[in-house]
Every structure is written in structure tokens, then in C-alpha cells.
Amino acid sequence: MNEQVDQLCKHLRLAYIADIYEEIPFENPTDSLLQLLKIEKDGREKAKAERNIKKARFLEYKTLEQYKWHKAICLPSRLDRQELESLRFIERKENLILVGAPGTGKTHLASALGRRACEKGYDVRFYRVAHLVEELENTLACGKWASFRKKLDKADVIILDEMGYLPFGKEGAELLFQLITECYEQKSLILTSNLEFSQWNRIFTDSRLTAALVDRLIHHAHIISYTGSSYRLTNALSKRT
């Protein structure tokens, strides 16, 4: 009998029920079936979250539970911490822009929100902007631009980390502009930068392109400002003293 059950579960792709059904007490048919179906649902959601996290390619393990909120993090008036962590901005295809000095926690928050999004079933991609621009240029040169764009089309959220640390060439800037334009009102972008928008001409040499890019980014966006100094530097100095 057990072998038949295992075979049927395998045929129906009920992998998690197959592992646990013998441990579920059979007192009421409806309750027992409900428990089994919940186990299957939870198992599938957990496996999907793990696949999403792996596919996102986060550079570090960061969670919202680890995040240290402090007074130097300035949330916009229409966004509080609870609303941010609910990820409803992703449902509405709104952007999130984190601006402030290096080492203040922007990447941690962006990565942690991305991980939470993966756990909720969203398809997420994480990129350091300099690496993404290099990849965009390479895919164009190799004739793989269309397939790369198609892959990104499937994402619900794209995280662009460290905008402004390195300037781009003309081609790289135009490719990044095209990518962001295609995301406009179609998916959410989470972007971190150490530069205020008025300084983005340092990385995008074309002022008109810069203005158009900023316009698209901030149209449906929540902007979080980090006004403090580097947490990493402060923490390192405190340990030395």
C-alpha cells in the first residue's frame, strides 16, 4: 500500500505529501486532507523561495530581522517601516531609491527587501550597476542582447546596487537607460546610490539622458535618504578605541 501511495504521489508531483503522510493522524477525513494539502503548499512555497533566492544572486546573506534602523534613515512621509516591509510597493510596481553616503546600510536594506520578496514568491535579480553595465555591453557585442532582455522581462524586481561608484561610457549609459526605460511601470526597481540626483551627470555624461533617466525613476518612487556617516567606519573606529 505504501508503495502505491508513493508512486501516486510521485505521478501527481506531490513530493511533500509523500514525505509526511504517514505522520498525519487520520481522525477526520477533511482535517487530515487539509493538513496534507497545507504541507504540500508550504513545501512548494519554501522550495520556490529557495530557487528565487539562488536565482537572484545576492552577494551577501542579509535579512530584515538583522537590519538596524536608526534616526539617520529618513523615510518619505507616505511610507513607514511596516508599509515598506509589506512590499506593497512591488505590487504597485513602484520604485525604491536609497540615497546616502557609502557604508550607511543601503545595500543591506535593498538585499533584505529582495530576499523577503523572494520568500513571497517574487522573481528578483540583484546587480551591482558596474557589473550590469559590463554584462549589457558584452551581451550586445555577442549578439545576445535580446535573450538577456527576455530573461530580465520575467523579473518582478530588479535591484541596482551602487549607482554612481563608477562612471560609464556612452554605450553602457545608453544600454542602462534603455533597460530602466523598459522597466518603467512594468516592474519595481530598488536602487542604491551614494550620489544625489543632481550629481548623476558624473556617471551619465549626456545631461538630457540623465534628466530623462531620473524622471522615469522617481515618477513612481519612494526615496529613502541616509543622512549619517558610514556605519562600517564608525563601527571599525569604535572597536579600535
Image (cartoon, helix red, strand yellow):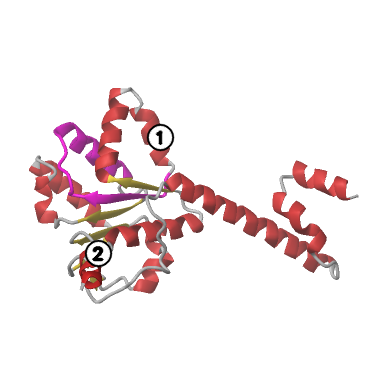
Image point (36%, 55%), residue name: 93
Q: Is residue 189 above or below residue 222?
A: above
Residue 45's disc is none
Would you call the spot at circle 1 few (<14 residues within 10 Å), some (14-19), or many (20 or more)? few
Please state, as top left, top right, bottom left or bottom right, where the C terminus lies in the image: bottom left
Is residue 73 shown left or right of residue 109?
left
The answer to if 167 sits in the magenta stretch is yes
Q: In this orientation, does residue 178 appear?
A: no
Is residue 55 shown left or right of residue 184?
right
In the image shown, does 136 or 210 lie closer to the viewer? 136
- Whichever of labels 2 and 1 marks the residue nearer the N terminus, that label is 1
The answer to if 151 sits in the magenta stretch is no
> Which residue range is magenta in the image?
155-183
The outermost residue toward the bottom is 71
User: What residue is shown with label 1?
Assistant: 150
Could you tell me residue 140's position as x and y percent? 29, 27
What secondary structure is marked by label 2?
Answer: helix
Image point (42%, 37%), residue name: 151
What secondary structure is marked by label 1?
Answer: helix
Could you tell me residue 69's position as x and y percent? 31, 73
User: What residue is shown with label 2?
Assistant: 232
